[in-house]
Image (cartoon, rainbow, N blue to C red):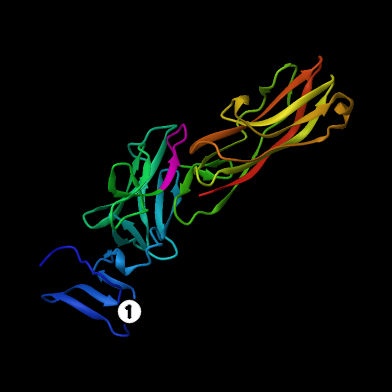
Amino acid sequence: MAGTIIADYIRADANKISLNVGNTVVASINSMGILNSTGSVMISSTGINSQEIGQCQLVLSSTTAIKLNPCNGQYIKIAGSFYSIPSSGVTLTNSGLSASTRYYIYAYISNGNVTLYASTTGYTTDSTAGNIGTPILTGNNAYTLVGMVYMNSSTQFADNSGNRNVLSYFNRLDKLLFGSASNYTTTSTTQIIVSPSMVGSLNWANDGICVWLTGQGGMTGSYSSVLAAYDNNTANYFGADQIIYGATGSLNPPVQVGGWLQPSEGYHQYYIGMGAVSGSGTASINNTRATGYVRG
């Protein structure tokens, strides 16, 4: 009888018990659980620790593909049952995706196999019996959330210190942020953005992000103010600003602004803002750097 193999338990014995259809082994009970001949599996939630919703990690594979790898196990919970992720992982390409767009990545079952799906639709926590607590595509618990990506202007995936555009929902890692720009000046008497984007990154709402912006400041007038901001808007400043007094203009004092923040979930870019806020003169910041980390 053809169909999906289901078990209400995990059984580990010294011996393997096989299930045959004719001369073909279609399933076996061994120390790994109940596996079919292709290595995929569906097991009811009573067979695995209920806390292990996602034994997986979403990673960059190339500029045109991402991959869901098994991590700290091999199972993922979808619609109340656990399915095995192959050791080679599950791949999703950038085909059909749009540039400069955030996507949530979901796992679902297609023809008995774990498959990835990209959607701009967000997620909720399932309240369905047997799947309670699982992050799912809003309105459809056949899709379990596994990550988030942001496609760059070339419709490519990226995950490097300057562009953290691939985050895993499960088994998150601390990912380094680093960027460098140049030297900037302004005579504005109000705070304005003076740098290009220093770094860009996604962030989960429940994890936030840490970004420090540094450089050497100077001021030929009375004093200036330097701040860290995101999304090219000084209204989105975070951390305390730093005052640079004109008397120290020739000394190039060190500047460090920014810190920990929790912007809305999604993709943001980080900038240096500055203004000669008292009196005439020129405010400057040189040798600028961005450092920090994000989890995903």
Residue at position x 66%, y 43% from top?
A: 291
> 218 left or right of 56?
right
Placement of the N terminus among the 4 image quadrants? bottom left
x and y percentages locating residue 214 in the rendered image: 72, 37
x and y percentages locating residue 140 in the rendered image: 28, 45
Above-or-below relation of 186 to 121: above
Q: Main secondary structure of the magenta part?
A: loop
x and y percentages locating residue 82 in the rendered image: 31, 61
Residue 143 part of the magenta segment: no
Residue at position x 21%, y 78% from top?
A: 18
Residue at position x 28%, y 66% from top?
A: 39
Please tell me in which quadrant of the rendered image residue 252 appears: top right
- The segment highlighted magenta reads 147-156
> 223 left or right of 105?
right
Above-or-below relation of 106 to 191: below
Please tell me in which quadrant of the rendered image residue 35 appears: bottom left
Mark 1 nearby-residue class (10 Å; few <14, some 14–19, many ≥20): few
Question: In the rendered structure, which amino acid carries the disc numbered 1?
Answer: Ala
Above-or-below relation of 33 to 175: below
Q: Count the numbered circles shown.
A: 1
User: Which of 254/26 is in front?
Assistant: 254
| Residue under pointer 1 | 12
x and y percentages locating residue 158 in the rendered image: 49, 42
Please tell me in which quadrant of the rendered image residue 221 appears: top right
User: Which of 44/58 is in front?
Assistant: 44
Residue 153 part of the magenta segment: yes
Identify the residue at the far right of this view: 247
Above-or-below relation of 211 to 296: above
